[in-house]
Image (cartoon, rainbow, N blue to C red):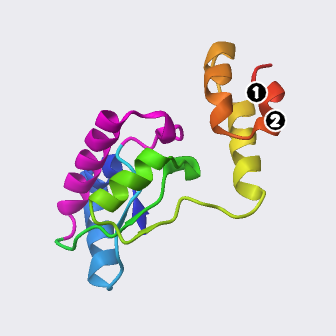
Amino acid sequence: MFVVGRDALQIENRESLQSIVAAGHELGNHSFEHQPWLQRYGVDALEAEFDRAEAALGRITDAKIAGFRGPGFSLSSDVLELLAKRGYRYDGSTFPTFLGPAARAYYMMRSSFSKQEKSDRAPNYLAAFQPAFVR
């Protein structure tokens, strides 16, 4: 189960997450802040995001975190290099159907981001929908 680090720190989630681990399931890193434009982060920001998420998950499980899935299925070469450097065994950030990009496009169109924020984030999603993002 991929878990957002910020959520792993919440006291009200601790028992549920511990029961998942006790049942034999693995917790995976789903970032700390869950920003769907993680692929835009520089290496230092990625390192900090992973440090925080891994520390939060470490409060729930003693197992080494082996898997990652980027928020909003975000991915970049820097993320992949960091995963390899940290010894992750797999990445689940790809979503090999039209549903992922379509869901991200819908999210952007329905968001309360300003026109400039939508324009800044549009390249991270689906280029075919880019004009619709900045309405």
Q: Position of residue 132 (x, y in %)?
A: 82, 28
Image quadrant in which you'd find residue 43: top left
Q: Main secondary structure of the magenta part?
A: helix
Magenta region: 33-61
Q: CA distance from mark 1 to mark 2?
A: 7 Å
Q: Position of residue 91 (x, y in %)?
A: 46, 64
What's the residue at 29%, 35% (across, down)?
Answer: 44
Can the viewer see residue 37? yes
- The three-letter amino acid code for the residue at tag 1 is Phe
Image marks 1 and 2: residues in contact by CB distance under 8 Å: yes
| Callout 1 secondary element | helix
Q: Vertical placement of 29 versus 19: above or below?
A: above
Q: Position of residue 10 (x, y in %)?
A: 28, 50
Image quadrant in which you'd find residue 14: bottom left
Within-10-Å neighbours for mark 2: few <14, some 14–19, many 20+:
some
Within-10-Å neighbours for mark 1: few <14, some 14–19, many 20+:
many
Q: Position of residue 57 (x, y in %)?
A: 25, 60
Numbered circle sitting on residue 129 = 2
